């Protein structure tokens, strides 16, 4: 049997698709994928009522590759995410008063 290996972009898209379905199962509506600003990218942005969720995804190939997600968030990455969230909210004023997750 031939095993198919996804490249990084395909693996990332597969992870985003999986998370989008799970979010929808819980009432979230994804409004943006891979949204970019000058210094950052937001993997998924979703709405549910008065709530907005910004998701940073790290898809892994196997359970063996799993690590504590907090280990993947460096100070630099956190600053970039905060900048991206601020830019998104500045450009989407209708989301500015939402509860942020």
Image: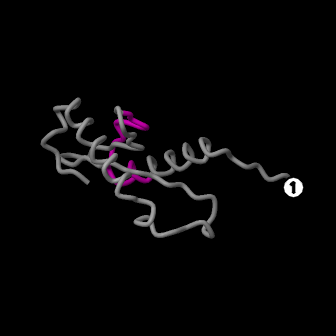
Residue interval drawn in magenta: 22-36
Horizontal side, residue 96 vs residue 48: left or right: left
Depth check, front residue: 30 or 84: 84
Residue at 27% x, 47% y: name it. Answer: 82
Left or right: 36 as drawn, with respect to 100:
right
Residue at the location (34% across, 46% down)?
80
- Taking depth in this image into account, of 38 and 4 the one nearest to the observer is 38
* Residue farthest to the left, as pictured: 97
Residue drawn at (28%, 42%) of the image: 83
Q: In this view, does 35 lie to the left or right of 50?
A: right
Image quarter hosting the C terminus: bottom left
Is residue 88 one of those drawn in magenta? Answer: no
Q: Where is residue 8 in the image (x, y as percent from the top left)?
A: 62, 46
**Would you name the residue on which mark 1 appears?**
1
Residue at image position (85%, 52%) is 2
Figure disc tally: 1
* Depicted 21 relative to depicted 73: above or below: above
Asked if 60 appears above or below 95 in the picture, the reply is: below
Indicate the secondary structure of the residue bearing disc 1: loop
């Amino acid at each position: 049997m031939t095993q198919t290996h996804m490249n990084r972009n395909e693996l990332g898209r597969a992870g985003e698709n999986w998370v989008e379905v799970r979010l929808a199962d819980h009432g979230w509506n994804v409004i943006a994928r891979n949204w970019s600003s000058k210094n950052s990218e937001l993997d998924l942005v979703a709405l549910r009522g008065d709530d907005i969720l910004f998701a940073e995804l790290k898809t892994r190939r196997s359970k063996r590759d799993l690590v504590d997600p907090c280990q993947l968030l460096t100070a630099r990455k956190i600053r970039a995410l905060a900048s991206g969230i601020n830019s998104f909210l500045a450009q989407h004023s209708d989301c500015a008063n939402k509860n942020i997750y």
